[in-house]
């Protein structure tokens, strides 16, 4: 049976990495929805693609930032 401190660390890592797994799809979906709503409101057809790409880029940036921060924690 793992020690309580080790078990806490396992749960902490699980939470951190599960949030990373949800980050990119959530940012992509948010960008798509914002673009879709802008297109419906303004009667255009290009905001969906633009906002989708911005959502993907934003999700990737946050993913990389979080991964770099986590790798710095593991090295200490």
Image: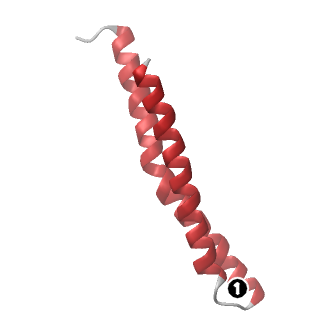
Quadrant where the C terminus lies? top left
Q: Residue furthest right?
A: 42
Which residue matches tag 1?
A: 40
Q: Is residue 23 shown left or right of residue 30?
A: left
Which of the image's four quarters has the N terminus?
top left
Tell me what residue is drawn at x 26 percent, y 12 percent.
Answer: 2
Horizontal and vertical percent position of residue 67: 46, 39
Vertical order, 71 against 37 (above or below): above
The number of callouts visible is: 1
Model colouring = secondary structure
Above/below status of 63 relative to 12: below
Q: Residue 10 placed where, x, y %?
A: 35, 23
In front of the other: 70 or 5 = 70
Q: Residue at 61% of width from left, 79% of height from top? A: 48
Residue visible at 51% across and 55% down? 60
Residue 46, relative to residue 34: is it above or below? Answer: below
Q: Quadrant of residue 41?
A: bottom right
The quadrant in which residue 38 appears is: bottom right
- 63 vs 33, nearest the viewer: 63
**Label 1 environment density (alpha carbons within 10 Å; few <14, some 14–19, many ≥20):** few
Horizontal side of 43 relative to 33 (left or right) equals right
Task: Out of 60 and 47, give the one closest to the viewer.
Answer: 60
Q: Residue furthest left?
A: 1
Identify the residue shown where x is 73% and y is 91%: 43
Residue 28 location (% of width, % of height) = 53, 64
Image coordinates of residue 31 in percent, x first then y, are 61, 67
SS category of the residue bearing label 1: helix
């Amino acid at each position: 049976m793992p020690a309580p401190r080790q078990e806490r660390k396992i749960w902490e890592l699980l939470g951190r990495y599960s949030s990373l797994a949800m980050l990119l799809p959530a940012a992509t979906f948010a960008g798509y929805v914002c673009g879709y709503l802008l297109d419906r409101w303004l009667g255009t057809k290009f905001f969906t693609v633009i906002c989708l790409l911005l959502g993907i880029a934003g999700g990737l940036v946050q993913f990389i930032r979080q991964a770099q921060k986590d790798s710095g924690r593991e090295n200490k």
